[in-house]
Image: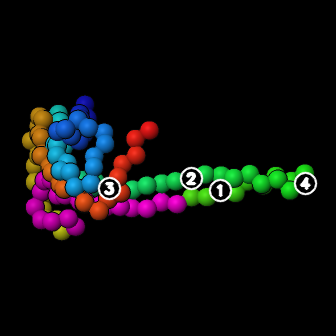
Amino acid sequence: MPKLLQFYAGFDQGKSVYRPGEMVSGALVINLARPMNMRAVNIKFSGKANVHWSERHKSGKTTTTRHYRASEVYFEQRLCMYGAGSIGTYQNATELPAGQTSLPFQFLLPSALPSSFEG
């Protein structure tokens, strides 16, 4: 039987769209069949946009397709959820007990984010 039974992030508000300046909160849930040694549990939240489109151009009998892509990172938030030290500096491993552990998190979305698009 594997040690790790469940590992997921649940959000308190149950929303799929957040707005600039809103607080995001929830918990990282870890369910272990047996105790597990680990140095840290980190979580990273990021907001980014990716866009891709293609255009076809015809010149005589030849058709060419040009692809356009762009991406932009709006924010990254990293949190150390469990373990000693800050992100990137870890101490000796500690034991996370068997069973379900809930590690709460919260962070504020930057107010300068572009608005969400629903549609």
Q: How far apart in space, not on screen, are marks 2 and 1 (Cα)?
A: 7 Å
Q: In this view, does 92 lie above or below 117?
A: below
Task: Give the labeled residue for mark 3.
Answer: 46
Q: What residue type is labelled 4?
A: Gly
Q: Name the residue under label 4.
A: 60
* Quadrant in which the C terminus is drawn: top left
Q: Is mark 1 on a helix, strand or loop?
A: strand
Residue 90's mark?
A: none
- Work out which residue is located at the far bottom of the displayed protein and give it: 89
Instruction: Report the amino acid beneath label 2.
Output: His
Q: What is the spatial separation of the Cα atoms under label 4 and label 2, in whole angstroms?
A: 26 Å
Residue type, mark 1 in image: His
- Can residue 7 be spotted in the picture? no
Q: Is any part of residue 47 visible from this angle?
A: yes
**CA–CA distance in space, label 1 to label 3:** 26 Å
Q: Do callouts 2 and 1 mark residues in contact (Cβ within 8 Å)?
A: yes
Marks 2 and 3, Cα distance to the nearest angstrom?
19 Å
Disc 3 residue type?
Ser
- Looking at this view, name the residue that lies furthest to the right: 60
Instruction: Determine whether 1 is above or below 19 in the image.
Output: above
In this view, the mark in front (2 or 3): 2
Callout in the foreground (4, 3): 4
